Amino acid sequence: MKNLMELELDNNMIIGLIPSTIGNLSNLSSLTMHRNKLNGPILFSFVHLTNLSFIDLSSNRFNGSLPLQIGHLENLNILNVSYNMLSGPIPTTFVDLLHSNPSSEYGLIRNYGITLEIDFSHNFIDGELPHLSLDHIRPTSIDFSYNNFMGKISDSFLFFRNINLSYNKLEGKVSDQILHRFDVSIVLGNQKLCGSIPPLHPCDSQHHGNFKMLTILFPSILLFVLCFSCFALVHSRSKKRVTHETKSNKHGNVFCIWDYDGKIAYDDIIEATEDFDIKYCIGTGGYGSVYRARLPNGKVVALKKLHTREAQETTLFKSFQNEVDMLKEIRHKNIIKLHGYCLHKRCMFLVYEYMERGSLFWVLSNDKEAVELDWKKRLNVIRRVSHALSYIHHDWITPIIHRDVTTSNILLDSNLEAFFI
């Protein structure tokens, strides 16, 4: 079928590798194999298909590295390989996609002004972010979120139309230009990043510079006093930290999932809820209660705490452990985020992202709220929940059956966007 221009094989149960014979479809411009069970490396046997402008291989089981030949697809406008198991660094030829290519035949700039959309999210890609040259760069939107990228964020990303670098291993300072050009949400989940906008940690380079200046300007006697004060302060903090750790261990603090600020602690939870006082309780079920807590950093979270009698049962304790092991690995935009947990036979609870509007069950049972949730928004709820269910049933490495799909397990944020729990 050498005249074939579009090939769509979405939402099937196709397994195995991409057939190499696709490389014979010389006129192919669109190739979509979204949501199948394709595996193995992505073999770009179709890199010579110069007409390809749209490729969607998302939600499969591809592994290995992205092929070096990726930069040969000079007419590409959309490339989506999200929700796979790709690893390794981005090939050096990737930057060739980001630039408009001169046409040797007409002397024009090819792809100039056409937005390039790249989605590599929800993989295991590592290495540093690509180094960009600003010559003839195309309008580009990239999503590198939920990977293992390392290194620093250069200001060259200012020239992108949209970017998402959240939940990686990036470090260093995020420039104010990037934070104002986009939004702080594009870099959340990188624990070693710092910047001027909360909830990022403030960068301490300025403080180091001021300290260096003080050592020059102030007399030596004052420096001695400062050093002595610093020593006393560090000693005091070390002693306090040891006391805190002892107290935490006493309570069984095993927070193994950290929020972006890394400051969730057992004592913070106890203080914020006054030891799970009933006035902070916002819901109760057969096996536990849900509490609302405002942490010292200002972040509001929801705590799902098991009843004491259930927490002391060995079978439920093991079941809880298995649930935590599963939840901490799931990363999907329609599944509510698990920030942390505490595992102890006398006190077990999960720390979730807080949803302002509560459960879908509560909204539908309230006449005023139900009217606001019009048919268009209800359809959006169904769409988001179906994506989440499809992900855990078909796209996760080991299929997960939820077994409790009810309106009580669908939560809504302030914009009535649905998240599955």
Image (cartoon, grey):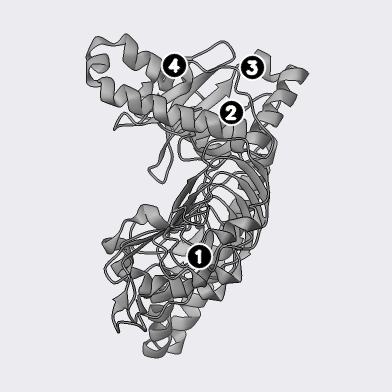
Q: Quadrant of residue 366?
A: top left
Q: Residue at x 57, y 39 (%)?
A: 340
Say whether disc 4 or disc 3 marks the residue closer to the N-terminus: 3
Kindly identify which residue carries mark 2: 349
Amino acid carrying label 2: it is Phe
Amino acid carrying label 3: it is Thr
Q: Is residue 25 visible?
A: yes
Residue 205 location in percent, x, y?
42, 75
Q: Residues within 10 Å of mark 4 (few under 14, many from 20)?
A: some
Q: Residues within 10 Å of mark 3 (few under 14, many from 20)?
A: some
Query: Is 310 situated above or below 158?
Result: above
Kindly identify which residue carries mark 1: 49
> Of all residues shown, which one is farthest toward the right?
314
User: In the rendered view, does 329 fall on the left or right side of 419?
Assistant: right
User: In the rendered view, does 374 fall on the left or right side of 217?
Assistant: left
Between marks 2 and 1 in the image, the one whose residue lies nearer the viewer: 1
Which numbered disc covers residue 407? 4
Q: Residues within 10 Å of mark 2 (few under 14, many from 20)?
A: many
Query: In the image shown, does 265 or 341 lie closer to the viewer?
Result: 341
Say whether disc 2 or disc 1 marks the residue closer to the N-terminus: 1
Kindly identify which residue carries mark 3: 308
Residue 50 location in percent, x, y?
46, 68
**Label 1, label 4: how far apart the Cα atoms are:** 47 Å
Residue 83 location in percent, x, y?
55, 47
Q: Residue at x 65, y 53 (%)?
A: 19
Between marks 2 and 4 in the image, the one whose residue lies nearer the viewer: 4
Q: Residue at x 55, y 56 (%)?
A: 147
Q: Is residue 198 visible?
A: no
**Label 2, label 4: how far apart the Cα atoms are:** 22 Å
Say whether disc 1 or disc 4 marks the residue closer to the N-terminus: 1
**Label 1, label 3: how far apart the Cα atoms are:** 63 Å
